[in-house]
Amino acid sequence: MDDRAAMVADKAAVADLQEGRTLTIRGMSKIVGIPLMITFYNQTNAVDVNVAKGVEEFKEADYESFNKSLCQYLDSMELAMYR
C-alpha cells in the first residue's frame, strides 16, 4: 500500500494515523441520504465536499443552494471533532 494512503478499519485506528496532507471520508450519509466524500486539508480551514447527483436537490445545485443544504451538516461535524 502507498505510504500516502491508509485504510482505517475502525474508529480507534484514526488516532494512529501519521499526520499527512489530507484526510478523506467517503460513504453513504444517513443524514443527507446520498453518497458523500469529504476531504479535510491538514493545517487549514479548507474542506472539499463531493455529493452524488442522486437527488433533485443536487442535480443542478449552485454555490448558494449547495451551502444551504450542507452547511449545517458540516458545522455539526466540526463541532463533533472538539469532543
Image (cartoon, rainbow, N blue to C red):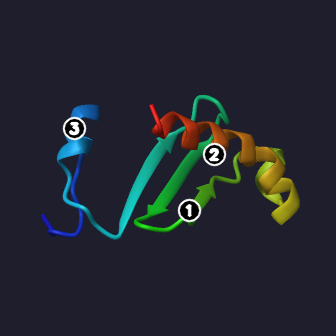
Mark 1 neighbour density, 10 Å: few (under 14) some (14–19) many (20 or more): some
Q: Secondary structure at mark 1?
A: strand
**Mark linked to residue 71:** none
Label 3: element kind: loop
Residue wearing tag 2 = 74
Residue 57 place in picture, x, y as percent: 83, 47
Q: Amino acid at mark 1?
A: Val
Q: Is residue 62 visible?
A: no
Callouts 2 and 1 close, C-beta under 8 Å? yes
Location of the C terminus (image quadrant): top left
Q: Position of residue 59 (x, y in %)?
A: 80, 56
Quarter residue 42 falls in: bottom left
Judge from the rendering whether residue 41 lies leftward or rightward of residue 4; answer left or right: right
Q: CA distance from mark 2 to mark 1?
A: 9 Å
Q: How many marks?
A: 3
Q: Residue at x 47, y 38 (%)?
A: 82
- The one nearer the camera, 65 or 34, is 65
User: Given contact means CB atoms under 8 Å apart, are the residues at marks 2 and 3 in contact?
Assistant: no
Q: Amino acid at mark 2?
A: Leu
For label 3, the residue is 9
Q: Disc 3 residue type?
A: Ala
Helix, strand or loop at label 2? It is helix
Residue occupying image coordinates x 55% and y 64%: 45
Task: Check if mark 3's residue and mark 1's residue have beta carbons within 8 Å.
Answer: no
Check disc 2: other Cα within 10 Å, few if <14, some if 14-19, many if 20+: some
- Taking the image as shown, residue 27 lies to the left or right of residue 2, namely right
Q: Which residue is mark 1?
A: 47
Q: Quadrant of residue 66?
A: bottom right
Of 58 and 73, nearer the camera is 73
